[in-house]
Amino acid sequence: MCGIVGGVSLEPISQYIIDGLKSLEYRGYDSAGIALSMDGRIELSRVKGRVDKLAQVLPQNLIATTGVGHTRWATHGEPSEINAHPQPSMHQQFTVVHNGVIDNYRSLKKRLENRGFQFLSETDTEVISNLLEFEYAQTGNVMQSIKNVMRQLVGSYALAILFDSDEEHLYFAKNRSPLVIGKGRDGMYLASDYIPMLAKAKEFVTITDHQYGYITHNDVVIYHDEQNTPLQISFHQTELVSEDIQLIGYPHYMLKEIEESTDVIRRLIDNYFDGNQYIFDALIIEKIKAARNIVFLACGTSYHACLIGRRYFRDQGKNCEVHIASEWAFYPYIADQDSIFIIVSQSGETADLIHCMEIINERGATVITITNTKGSTLDRAADHTLLLFAGIEIAVASTKAYIAQVALFALIAGAIAGTTNTVSDLVQIIKVQKEIIKKRDSLIPHAQFISKNSDVYFLGRGYDYDVARECSLKLKEITYIHSEAFPGGELKHGPIALIEKGTPVIGFVSDPMTADPIRSNFQEVCARGADVLIISSKSLARTGDQIVLPDVQLYLTPLIKVMIGQYLAYFAALELGYNIDKPRNLAKSVTVE
C-alpha cells in the first residue's frame, strides 16, 4: 500500500526520491510528500494527488543530500495535504513517514495532548513524530528516543525519521511492515520495496521486526530493541532488475504482464524440473505427503489460485481446505500438529497473512510460504519457501502471479504423484497461451459490449467455477462494473432472480462431465433475456460458441481460460477510459489489516 523512499547520498537526492515514488505508484495511494534535510531545517512539500503534482510544487533550488518521500493510502483521516506524509512534530524537530497502523494511537494522542502537544492532522503518524519530540526532551538522544517510542507503539510500522539538526543521518524503525536498505556507490538508501533502489543499489539488507537504526552516506547501523550493541549486517542481492519495470512498448503494465505468462511458466519449469526429475526440496514434498491436513491461506487473487490448488491436492488423496486469511486470522483452527499450512502471497508482505503466520508459529505447525518475493516477511518466517519466479508485477490487478501460483501447484502435485506428465502438459499450455496472445484483438468487440453494462455474471462448474471467480474479480477491479461468479447449479437457488433482458453472462465449458448441465444453465438465463458469451474448449464446442480455445488437460484449463477473462477486463477498462494499472481505492501490496 503506502510507499517509502529515502536516503543519504553524496549527490542531490530530491529527484531520486521523486523517481522512486513514481516506481511505487503501483502500490496504490492518494497523496504524496517529500521532506529534505538542509541548512539545519526540514523542507517539507506535500500534495493531495499524484507524484507528478508533488514534483511540480517541489522548489527547484533545493540542494539536499538527505531526504525521504512517501505515498499515502489513507487509513486515518481523509486524503488531504494536511494528512499527507511526511508528518512533522509540533516544533518540527522530527519529521516522520510511516507505513502501517498504530492501534493505540488514540490513547497516546490523548496523553500527549495532556502534556501540551497540539495536532494538525488526523493521522496516527503525527502521534509518532510528537512522541519522538517528547522523548527527546527527556533523553537528549535520538536513538534512545526511537527505542522508547517503539516500546509504546502497538501495531504495525515502518518508519523513516529525520531530525531537524542532523543532515547526515536518516533514522528508521520497523515492526510488521516491510523496510529494506540498499547500499549504493554514492550513498545508502531505504524503501518499502526493492524497486525504487534498483537503479542505485546492488546490495541490500532487510530490516526485521523490532529493529531500528540509521543510515549515513556510507554506513548502516542496526539495533534490536532488546540489545544495546549494533547487529552484524549481512547484505544480499536480488534477482530483480530495473529493466523489469520498463513498459518496453506496451501501453499498460497489465497488458505486458498478461503476456509475460508464457515466460512465467517456463521459468517455473526451469527452476523446479531438471529435464528428468523434479528438483523441489525433498523435505517439502515429504512433509506434504505425510500431512493429515493441508490448509491454504491467502487473499484475493491468491485465494482464487488456492481453490485450484485444493483440487490438485485432493486428487492426490490429501485432506485439503482453503481459507481467506483475514477471516482465519480471527477465527483460527488447527486440527492437529500434523497439519501443514501453505501461505500464498505475491508480495510476501500481506498483513492478514503475517497475522496468520504469527498464530501458526505460536502453535508449532509447519508453514510453507509460496511467494514472488525472496526475503519478504512471509519468506523469512516460514519453515520452507517456494518462489514463484514471476518477475515484478506492477499493475495493481494481478495477472501473471495467478498463473504462476496455479502452475506451481500443478508442479507440486506432479512431484507428490511422482509423474512428470505435468511438465509436458504445461509446455502445451505455453503453446496455447501464445495462440491466445496472437488473437487477443478478436476479444475487443466482446469487451466493448461488456463495458456498456452495469452488471456482469460468470457461470462455471468445477475448475470453470474457480476460474470464473478470478475473472469476475479482474473485471470489477479495473472496470468498476459489478460482477459476480456463480456455480451453474446454484442459479435456481437465488441468483437467477438477477437476470433480465440484456444482462451479460459469461460462461465456461471445459469439463466433459458437466458440459451438458452447464449448457442447460446457459439456456435458463437465455430464456430470461440474458446475452451469453460462451468460452469453450474445442472438443466441447457447439455452433454459436463465441470463443473456442484449443484443448488442453482439464486440470490446466484455468491457465488459459483466465487469460480470456484478463483480456476482457483489460479491453473493457480501456474502452471506458479508466486508469488500468492503478484502479481507484486499490493497493498492490495490502500491508494493513
Image (cartoon, helix red, strand yellow):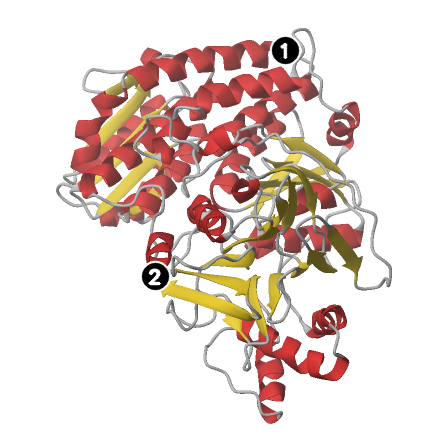
Q: Residue at x 52, y 87 (%)?
A: 118
Tag in front: 1 or 2: 2
Q: Of the residues shown, which amino acid type is indicated by label 2?
A: Val
Q: Is residue 452 above or below residue 127?
A: above
Q: Quadrant of the C terminus?
A: bottom right
Q: Secondary structure at mark 2?
A: helix
Disc 2 crowd rating (10 Å Cα; few below 14, some 14-19, many 20+) is few
Left/right of residue 134 with respect to residue 588 in the rendered view: right
Q: Is residue 134 above or below residue 155?
A: below
Specify the quadrant of the image occupied by residue 226: bottom right
Q: CA distance from mark 1 to mark 2?
A: 59 Å
| Residue 537 appears in the figure | no
Q: Position of residue 464 (x, y in %)?
A: 40, 29
How many callouts does the rendering have? 2
Q: Nearer the viewer, residue 83 or 218?
A: 218
Q: Of the residues shown, which amino acid type is indicated by label 1?
A: Thr
Which mark is on residue 398? none
Q: Secondary structure at mark 1?
A: loop
Circle nearer the N terminus (1, 2): 2
- Residue ID for mark 2: 57
Disc 1 crowd rating (10 Å Cα; few below 14, some 14-19, many 20+) is some
Q: Residue at x 46, y 30 (%)?
A: 400
- Residue ID for mark 1: 420
Q: Residue at x 78, y 23 (%)?
A: 282
Q: Position of residue 67 (x, y in %)?
A: 55, 58
| Residue 372 appears in the figure | yes
Q: Position of residue 263 (x, y in %)?
A: 49, 19
Q: Is residue 292 above or below residue 484?
A: above
Q: Position of residue 60 (x, y in %)?
A: 38, 57
